[in-house]
Image: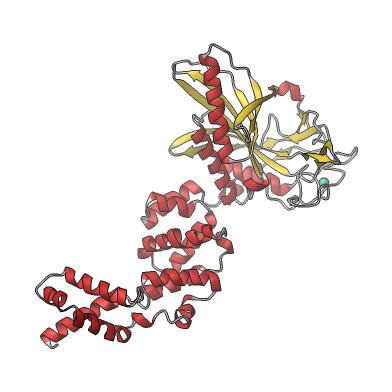
Amino acid sequence: MRTYLTTIGLEVHVQLKTASKMFCTNSAEYFGAQPNSHVCPVCLGLPGALPVANEKAIESVTRFALALNCRINKQSKFDRKNYFYPDLPKGYQISQFDLPIGEQGWLELDGKKIGITRVHLEEDTGKLIHANVNGEKVSLIDFNRSGVPLMEIVTEPDIESPEEARSFSKLIHQIARYLEVSNADMEKAGMRFDANVSIRPRGATKLGNKVEIKNINSFRFLEKALAYEIGRQVEILESGGKIIQETRGWVESKNVTVSQRTKETSPDYRYFPEPDLPPLVFEQAQIEALKNSLPELPAEKSKRFEEEYSLDKKYVRILTEDSNVAQWYEKALSLYSKEKSKILANWVVEELLRIIHDKNLIINGVPIEPAGLIELLTILDKGEINQTTARRVLVRMFETGNLPSRIVNEENLAQLSKSEDLESVVEEIIRENQKAVKDFKNGKEASIGFLVGQIMSKTKGQANPKTAETLVRKKIYGNQSGS
Ligand SMILES: [Zn+2]
């Protein structure tokens, strides 16, 4: 079998987070609402209704395009994309054609530049629901989604594998959330993908015929659909067949792509400028101001976390995946000590985020403030409690919402960490383990570990090993030297 090279280009649709829809005043937050309860003459496409563009949506797309290193067109406009479909009441979609908001950008993915062809703004369509009513198969239409602002990001065919397509999509998702232009909520179809994929034998310069896979709504499905499609194309070429340029759909239940229609080309859509909306005109100063308002993006943040806090890549990746987590960590660190960046990262990643994950929470929904965790770590640092107890206290903080000092006091967790509480246990252990004591006196340093271990087990893990060790040394040397 010959080896084949894969070429993938993505179109990513991201629903924008705005209060109202793209061209009318209906609320854009329709998820879970009664069907057709968020509609008006504009988004129902009734004759004579006039659209008014949503300024926040335009600003969001412009900021996103800037984050993707795009050139912002000083003049852009809306166009009508004509096609007939039941969920499209006007018979056309307001989109952007030859003058999108942003063009010619790039995004770095694991050290490789992926070209961004364009970033444009359009409106979402309604939703078809195929149902069974009184034994009859019917198609119902819900127009709540009709007219919700949608950003489309189109890449150059620079993606070379299904895994890379998945990583790239995740990066887009991450940036959308960093910029707070979208919730990009995958479960609510807030982000959808179309992927163009072609293969060619290694050495061939001409790209193969491309197939478009439409409407994929998860990162995993995107990767699976592309992998399946590449396999299907290889099989056809190997058996001497030809790839037909067409649109296919991913059928999750069967794990296959199926042919839907032969691909339209832009003339089929008869694009023309939207006569009811004025062109968008940007001043250089406006563009500069938006550019300066961009927050620190994932790539910069990761780099800074690595350098400033000397954290390893795994922790950096986890801490910067969600900007809210990164912010939480930095807030906590500012209350602690920069020298302890690694200790804190360890607690946030291994303990805090683990509990958050287990309880299916988000960082902004947890009952623990950064100051609360730092109070816990300070008590731990002072030796009032040990590591094992500290972990227990953190869980109790989640359960009760109380501060660690209160939990430690009320639940008597500190008692065995104070010297006076350990005194009698230490004496007992020394009495019972005279051989180890003798070995230690003769220079066998490891014996101290054994003695501390005995104390830990006698106190069921609640002793502070540092206090215990100090006390053991004091008792032994005290007896020996009399000092
Ligand atoms: Zn409306």
Q: How is the image coloured?
A: secondary structure
Position of the C terminus, as image quadrant, is bottom left
To which quarter of the image does residue 346 belong? bottom left
Q: Residue furthest left?
A: 442
Residue in the picture at 56% in, 65% down? 366
Nearer the observer, 41 or 220: 220
Residue 223: image x %, image y %?
A: 54, 35
To which quarter of the image does residue 50 belong? top right
Q: Residue furthest bottom?
A: 482
Residue 374: tell me if it is visible. Answer: no
Q: Residue furthest top?
A: 240
Query: In screen coordinates, is 126 left or right of 225?
Result: right
Residue 247: tell me if it is visible. Answer: yes
Nearer the observer, 327 or 317: 317
Residue in the picture at 44% in, 39% down? 110
Q: How many callouts does the rendering have? A: 0
Q: Residue furthest right?
A: 47
Residue 434: image x %, image y %?
A: 15, 79
Query: In screen coordinates, is 471 left or right of 347?
Result: left
Residue in the picture at 54% in, 43% down? 170
Residue 442: image x %, image y %?
A: 9, 74
Position of the N terminus, as image quadrant, is top left
Residue 304: image x %, image y %?
A: 42, 52
Nearer the observer, 201 or 305: 201
